[in-house]
Image: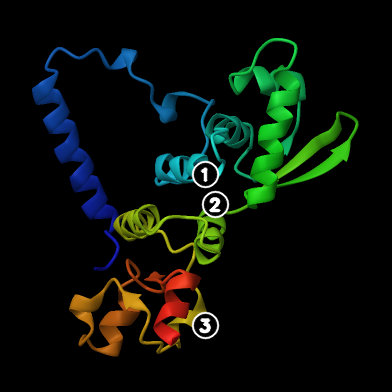
Amino acid sequence: MAPMSKKQRSKVARQKAALRDSLWPKLNESRLWGYGNSEGWLNIPRALPLILRIMDNMSKGKPVSATYLDLWCRTFNDAFVVAKPREMSFFSGFSGERAERTWASRMKILHDLGFIDIKDGPSGPISYVLILNPYKVVKEQYEKGNVDSKSYNALMARMIEIKATDIEDDEDLDDEDDDDIDLDDDNADDTDESKDTDRSSKGLKIKPKPEKAAKKAS
């Protein structure tokens, strides 16, 4: 399925607006938040809610999603944050004498899982933060056996739905491994031309966890 054109997206937007107006006919739009009327916004992945759930599942009872979300909201679409530990610990939901220490422990978990990189500086051991592509991190963790297949499959399906190609790997496109499951199986007999235009599923393949692959090999 080819990406929607600008005209198609505009049509969908009009249809959604008509539906909303029918459900809330007396709506005062000034009470809604709109990015076009505000400077306080940034871009986030549409699959972020699921990614946050996945990272919390990996953090072994020490939720990191609030800390991660605060990090993301401090970027200027550049994946880079100049840390303010005291303020950021509060925004992440921690308070009291141990707030900064707890925040720092969550940051270490995010670092150990591969979601961020950290550099020291004037604010201490956590002064500068780089946010790495969470799609790629989840894929790497899945291949290590640290993400359950249910969550990973749900993320793959969501990526196809929103046409995200962040984990597209050119090497995977040439891989004819029988263990791979192509989510675009229904179009397996399409012509090469149609495959080239179908960005919605290109390169998004689900590989079995290492332990499952080992069982098959035996």
Question: Mark 1 highlights which residue?
Answer: 55
Q: Secondary structure at mark 3?
A: helix
Residue type marked 3:
Glu
Question: Callout 2: 10 Å neighbours few (<14), some, many (20+)?
Answer: many
In this view of the protein, which residue sits in the foreground, 14 or 206? 206
Residue beneath the point at 21% across and 85% down = 190
Q: Quadrant of the C terminus?
A: bottom left
User: Which quadrant holds residue 188?
Assistant: bottom left
- Cα separation between marks 1 and 3: 27 Å
| 32 horizontally vs 123: left or right | left
Q: Position of residue 35 (x, y in %)?
A: 43, 29
Give the number of callouts: 3
Image height of 32 relative to 59, above or below: above
Q: Amino acid at mark 1?
A: Met
The first of marks 2 and 3 along the sequence is 2
Badge 2 vs badge 1, beta-carbon distance below 8 Å: yes
Q: Is residue 193 left or right of residue 174?
A: left
Q: Residues within 10 Å of mark 1 (few under 14, many from 20)?
A: many
Q: Nearer the viewer, mark 1 or mark 3?
A: 1
Can you give x and y, in whole percent of width and height, for residue 34 in the image? 38, 26
Q: Residue 28: where, in percent of width, then height?
A: 24, 12
> Closer to the camera, 30 or 211?
211
Image coordinates for residue 194, horizontal then vertical, percent: 26, 81
Q: Which residue is mark 3?
A: 171
Amino acid carrying label 2: it is Pro
Separation of marks 2 and 3 at Cα, in angstroms? 20 Å
Say whether residue 122 is left or right of residue 50: right
Q: Regarding mark 1 in the picture, which secondary structure is present there?
A: helix
Q: Which mark is residue 134?
A: 2
Q: Secondary structure at mark 2?
A: helix
**Of marks 1 and 3, which one's residue comes earlier in the chain?**
1
Vertically, is 217 above or below 88? below
